[in-house]
Image (cartoon, rainbow, N blue to C red):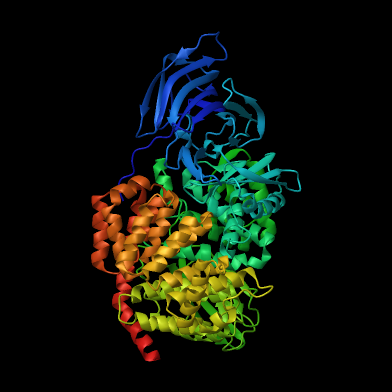
Amino acid sequence: MQEKREFKRLPKDVVPSNYNIRLKPDLDAFVFQGQEAIDVEVKKPTDTVTVNSLNIKISEVTYHAHEGGDSSLVAEVSTDKEAETATFKFPSALQPGKGVLKVSFTGELNDKMAGFYRSRYTMPDGGKRVGAVTHFEATGARQAFPGWDEPAVKATFDITLVVPKDKTALSNMPVKSDTPDKDPNWRVVEYDRTPIMSTYLLAFIVGDYDYVEGKDVDGVVVRVYTPVGKKEQGKFALDVAVKTLPFYKEYFGIPYRLPKVDLIALADFLIGAMENWGLVTYRETALLVDPTNSSANVKQYVALVVGHELAHMWFGNLVTMEWWTNLWLKEGFTSWIEYLCVDECFPEYDIWTQFVNIDLGRALELDALHTSHPVEVPVGHPAEVDEIFDAISYCKGASVIRMLHDYLGDEDFRKGMNKYLTKHSYQNTESEDLWASLGEASRKPVAKMMNTWTKQMGFPVIKVNERQDGDKRVLTVTQEKFCADGNLPTDDKSSWWVPISFSTASSPSTPVKTIMLEGKSSEVTLDNVKAGEWVKVNTNTVGVYRVQYPTEMLAALIPAVKDRSLPPRDRLGLQSDLFALARAGMAASEDVLKVVEAFINEDNYTVWNDLALNLSSMAVLLQYTDSYDLYKTFARDLFSQVVKTVGWDKKEGESHLTAMLRDLILTKMGRYGDEPTVAEARKRFESHCSGDKVIPPDLRAPVFITVLSEDRSEDFNRLMELYDKADMQEEKIRIARALGAVKKEELINRVHEFAASDKVRAQDKVSVLAGTTGSAKGRELTWNFVKENWKDLREKHHGHLLTRLVKASTHNFATEEMAKEVEDFFQANPTPAAERTVQQSVENIRLNTRWMKESADKVCQFLKNRN
């Protein structure tokens, strides 16, 4: 890695207690004027005050001490763009005590989706408008006003917005006064003072919006703001939010602290959503649900995102991490509790099974790489923060919290959470503070256990051996670090405190025994387990580890997969572990495919989803062999039973999960060229385009992808027409992501042109490009496109969009030449913000290369022998 750039936090000799900020955005000239009066305390004599400021033009700075007459000191201003600071030098030292720092400034409403920026949207009459919105995490506030933009420097805020008279204007708090300006075309909106909070949680928005409103049982006013004319699409999120606030209040034992919460859908938004206290901002696709045109997938996603962001009102906002090193603390926790909340609101989603696929699976995949990082990763310069908004902070963080919750039990966990939030309200914390509260409540060694999971990289593989002793089963469990390439570094000293649970055929869902493995290995005796009866390690797949069984133990589990007596989370975990072990060279890939055949009767959406994902990873590599068509036959055979079960049409009273399963299975069957599926998709597409019969939302992705897979230019043109006509962002994204299913060079190039055009919003361009990398030809052309346009792409993508772009365009290659090419390209074009992602992509390419060398021939032989 490149050397970390030198970085110093702000001096602590002057600290703020309240900001009074007045802003006037000009939506035509894309600039804003600002004045602020900051109440500060001077801790020791100093003639300089340094604050964070970036791309702000400061015209005047004065300081007026509360004690000491009427005189005010005028400062000279200097800025340091690299350090993102402004320094105010006064003619004499400010003396200890309280005073007011007054600053006048102007800034730009930029087009980078960071700070105070402009957002473009279309009105129902087709008119184009511009609004002004904010995104401050991690360090955007300094692009809106000079101040102390570090999470530990908390203060209160009084916000005043001067806005065009016909615009909606929102901030964190309710409106205190709304009066005409002296210019009759403008009005002045003042908001109540915020609680004491970190600067990155502030927000203000000016634009055109409709809203729907409700109240929770405690009288908190909840509003969901939508684009004009789309109020209906805010009702689902409103319903979720109104149920969620009381759930968290009861769970944490602490009420929501503000009188209102607004949730708003923004047209241009860098990430999924942001938890600004009292004014939560979302991408349209993370908040809006159309009663007739939204898929089950989207509804579930919206429910999870709303649950996640509202959990932050307590965990992140009321109590905040001291510095970005502990980012995982708020993100990992809320990524776990969002599932608890959705399970409460929608038990029919079986959301905890999906957790194993969505969060635990992603965490284990990334964390097995040598280029992963610990959950707690030291952060110096805030520019390094973007790199850790990843599957380790979110998904591994959530997974270790889930494991801890299971180990402590819900009652002690809740007691500990209440202790933590009560003790540290309105303050900043580190991981150790949470472990202390949970340890106190449970009287268990929480810190000792959790430090092994958050301070060291990676996770273990638990290797199991067994012997029968009468009606007892004696197991030996041994831990060692799991590496994606199977190569444990020689000097590796990793060791975890691992809660290990065991279930059996006579107790499939409840562990018959749980132990804490603290050292290298342990012997465990299970009573009343007959010879041949299956034993499953890691009941419900709660533990953050892989399991490697001996042949007989694995063989005993196969019939339980086939007859589904092994519960879904365990069926999912079993095949997920096997694919990972095969990739690491610790199991034979062809043997894993034999186990996979036992899933022929599988009926669970989430198990299929994870299995299909794992098979796709293998399929990507088999494209480079002569057996890809044979693989497609294998996949079609595997899906043949479930496709009959779900069919094409929704049945009365069917579950949300069946709709998602149909979408998944038909997409796969279409991609793998199943003739009846292709014919039916074609028929429904023709009918949809002619206007005879609109395709239901859950079937649109499978139909679009299947039809595009046939590579006809006229289909591509018709989908582009549908894209242009679509009024809903969800539909546009659905079509845009499907376009990459084409395989002809000419059509792939058209997808690239489309992605680069103004037709696709900045935050969605990477998804469109990523869609083209499913085929070998698409991968190659997309990488070439990225290289040729790198300067422009790097200019337009930053933060996590840049890391996603790097990953999407590089990580599925499978030769040493490509690994070298990717390495060389980024060496010649340094991209500090995506440096770790480049290393992870290169490591993945080398893993693929090794698999091709060691396993591809045997898998191809297995596929040939089937026919």
Q: Is residue 649 above or below residue 801?
A: below
**Residue 324 horizontal/vertical position (percent):** 47, 44
**Residue 306 horizontal/vertical position (percent):** 61, 52
Q: Is residue 118 above or below residue 287?
A: above
Q: Image quarter for residue 21?
A: top right
What's the residue at 34%, 38% (across, down)?
6
Please tell me how many numbered marks the rendered image carries: 0
Q: Quadrant of the C terminus?
A: bottom left
Q: Image quarter for residue 81?
A: top left
Q: Nearer the viewer, residue 479 or 818?
A: 818
Q: Image quarter for residue 424?
A: top right
Q: Nearer the viewer, residue 504 or 768?
A: 768
Q: Nearer the viewer, residue 268 or 403?
A: 268
**Residue 694 horizontal/vertical position (percent):** 56, 67
Q: Nearer the viewer, residue 576 or 291?
A: 291
Is 474 placed left or right of 412 in the picture? left
Q: Is residue 413 above or below residue 654?
A: above
What's the residue at 36%, 65% (across, down)?
773
Is 532 placed left or right of 831 in the picture? right
Is 857 placed left or right of 198 in the picture? left
Res. 391 in view: no
Res. 150 in view: yes
What's the residue at 58%, 78% (across, down)?
646
